[in-house]
Amino acid sequence: MRRKLWSAAAAALLVSAGIAVPGPAEANDRWEYCGNDALVKQELKNGTLWQMCWRVDVKTGLVLEKVAFKGKRDKLPIMVLDSSTIAQLNVPYDSGFNEWNDITSYGFGGDFMQPLAASDCKGQRRGVWTGAGQDAKKVLCISEEEAGLAHRLEGETPEKPYAKMGSDLVLQTISKVGWYEYITEYRFADDGQISVRLGATGDLAPRDYTTPDQGWPIGPGQTDYSVNHYHSAFWRVDFNIGGYGTEKVEQYDTAPTGERGRRAAIYSTSKTDVATEATLNTATRRWWRVVSPTSKNADGHFRSYELELGANDPYEAHPETQPDVTFTQYKPCEKFATFNQDPECAGTTILEYTNGERLSDPVMWVRVGFHHVPRDEDQSPMPVHWQGFDLVPRDFTAQNPLAPADRLDVNGDGVS
């Protein structure tokens, strides 16, 4: 089991970092205390605080650990994630001429991680030692960015609505693999949402040109067809909601019952417990959440985070790039979604990890595909295109953490 007793010293370090710690019987022995250089702790304009550790892995690049959220009315930060990082980037060409696995064959860390210039980052730049014989280079950008209207509700007069502008804590690194430059980005919203994204920019690869049915004409006339290709990105997300771990996975599906009510069709929502390791795919009105069996909000509801997937192109040619999300039992040697390189694990892909083991400490593997059909505007430099997913708090707090004080009495039915 991953969750074991802490030593007194480890617990003391967490307390000194200002994170709410469970009692000894529930504590997590995987806390790696980070000092000032590796600690990101920032309060946003609306009073929300996010706190986490960061480091750079030679293969996966930016790794975030011990991610905690504190609303403006919370006493201490509450743990959300144990860790999150990209776990593979599969890049096959439609022509079949090339296929790359940018994480396991090259990597987003080490020499592939780019130093950030002032023009790359409008916030704070943090440095890290990247290898023997190299100086520390500033690779992490930390900034607070405006996120637009967070909420609005008509007030007592039209001139005074309940309206608030939101902001995000944004962490970014840039890694250059071949002609592409990849932006690893995490956006931590002041309402508790976490957006995980991969941006691709840089340049289209020269000489990668093909026939009209496998590419798109760029440049003068109809002669140079830049090859279409995939970016199938995988992320490995390990939750630790409330600092207790042992989360459960639930799938929800909403479907019509075939009956009608007074004015509309009747739909019914059902829950399926994902009790064992599984590879799963999206469907209409289907979603998943990872829920703590022990940590509750002030309403007595178990805290959870919901996975939200947006645009997503599966690559059907590989079985391992077909599932949208995979849940496996935690094993430290299962580091990459494909071509796993840890000899302690017999399996090398997510399909081999899912062998029916019961989930008591689930790890979530999210695959988001982007089919890139080049266009004239991609030259040069190529505008950033994004792919990723959102982790949305569900019952993590009893009410909107940004709610004004005079709306706190609105909680459930039959209230003013």
Image (spheres, rainbow, N blue to C red):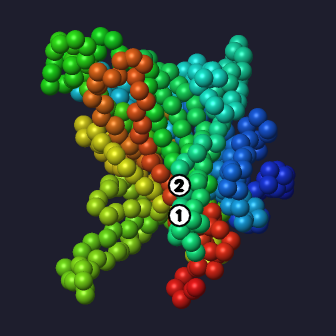
- Please state which of residues 227 and 348 is positioned toward the viewer in this rendering: 227
Q: Give the image location of residue 113, x and y in percent.
A: 57, 23
The local secondary structure at tag 2 comes to strand
> Taking 229 as reference, is 16 above or below it?
below
Is 139 above or below relative to 290? above
Per the rendering, the mark at residue 152 is 1
- Viewer-side residue, 404 vs 262: 404
Residue at 28% x, 61% y is: 284
- Amino acid type at circle 1 is Arg
Which quadrant holds the C terminus?
Answer: bottom right
What residue is shown at x 66% (from left), y 75% (from top)? 406
Q: Residue at x 22, y 23 (%)?
A: 216
Q: Where is residue 71 shown, x and y percent of the image?
A: 68, 61
* Mark 2: amino acid: Leu
Tell me the quarter of the picture where residue 22 sits. Answer: bottom right
Residue 149's mark? 2
- Indicate the position of residue 144 as horizontal and vertical percent values: 64, 42
Residue 358 visible, this angle: no
Looking at the picture, how far across and down is residue 401, in whole percent? 63, 64
Determine the secondary structure under disc 1: strand
Work out which quarter of the rendered image holds the N terminus and state it. Answer: bottom right
Q: CA distance from mark 1 to mark 2?
A: 7 Å
Question: Camera-side residue: 12 or 416?
Answer: 416
- At a point 58% along the width and 31% down the height, the residue shown is 173
The answer to whether mark 1 and mark 2 are in CB contact below 8 A is yes
Decide: is 8 above or below 406. above
Q: Which mark is residue 54?
A: none
